[in-house]
Image (cartoon, rainbow, N blue to C red):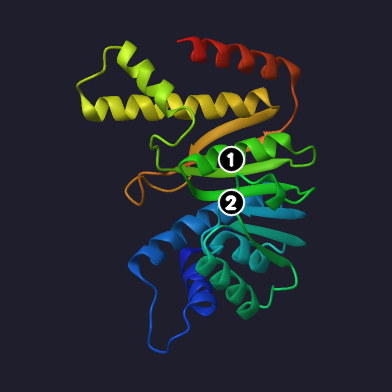
Amino acid sequence: MTFDPSQIESLLHEAYIVAEGTRLRDEDRRKAVEVAALLTEMARHKKRGHLVDAAAGKAYVGVLAAKLIGYARVTVIEREADRVRASREAALRLGVEARVQVIQGDVGDTSCWPGQYDLAAGLHACGPASDSVIEAVSRSQEAKWLFLVPCCYGERVPFAKWAEALAERAGVGHHSEVRRRLVTGFIDAERTLRLEAAGWEVTVVPFVPPTLTPHHLLWRARRTREATRMAQARAKLGELASG
């Protein structure tokens, strides 16, 4: 099952464009490419069950996943009221409102997450939202798949200050672009190891071209609870934390 960006554009227009004569913005057309790629990955690995679309924005992923992949249930978590409203209206326009629940709240709030779900997705989960998603799926006893695209590596990211310190220790203090890439790499490594320590088998892959967005890496994780991998990841996390 694969999805074409033009197909996604058409559905986005149907679901989110209300005013007559209005067209999708260039930003939305670029987002359609990302949504098509992410939905293709999700459908390839997990076609059934309960999906959580976390830090969802207008829930492009969740609403279209309900429509195209046919998940039995979709829970959308988004904190901004206008985006929550847009998500609910989009689900209604596409006829999937019975299967899509939109919750207004922060992904860091455990009460917003359903007790049981099968997979979670986060497309451009900004800053610490990605870490909140990782923590949430790691707590879950039922979740089997995670599809996460992190975005924005600012100082609010939990590991950011330590990553900056590691870069400083490495002597990369005055070369801003090199330092930025190194800090980002440390944050990415810590997130990957944290998932593995919690029992996930993680693959990090480019899911769209870097010319489309600088945030083009997808964390595709499958819950295996493989003891050796978990122990190795915990040891590596300790080494990373100690510098």
Badge 2, how many Cα within 10 Å: few under 14, some, many 20+? some
Q: Characterize the local packing of mark 1: few (<14), some (14-19) or many (20 or more) Cα atoms within 10 angstroms.
A: many
Q: Which residue is mark 1?
A: 132
Amino acid type, mark 2:
Asp
Image quarter in which the N terminus is found? bottom right
- The residue located at (43%, 60%) in the rendering is 31
Q: Is residue 139 visible?
A: yes
Q: Nearer the viewer, residue 130 or 40?
A: 130
**Callout 1 touching callout 2 (CB < 8 Å):** yes
The C terminus - image quarter = top left
Give the residue pinned by disc 2: 106
Residue sitting nearer the eye, 220 or 128: 128
> Residue placed at 52% from the left, 79% from the top?
14
Q: Determine the residue positioned at 69% across, 34% down.
A: 138
Q: Pick whichever of labels 1 and 2 is earlier in the sequence.
A: 2
Residue 206 percent coordinates (x, y): 45, 41
Q: Position of residue 179 (x, y in %)?
A: 28, 25
Taking the image as shown, residue 178 lies to the left or right of residue 7, namely left
Against 191, residue 53 (above or below) is below
| Element class at badge 2 | loop
Inspect this view and state whether residue 1 appears.
no
In the image, is 126 to the left or to the right of 100?
left
SS class of the residue under badge 1? helix
Callout 1 amino acid:
Ser
Return the x and y of residue 122 as percentages of the image width and height.
Answer: 56, 49
The picture places residue 99, in percent across and down from the top left corner, at 74, 68
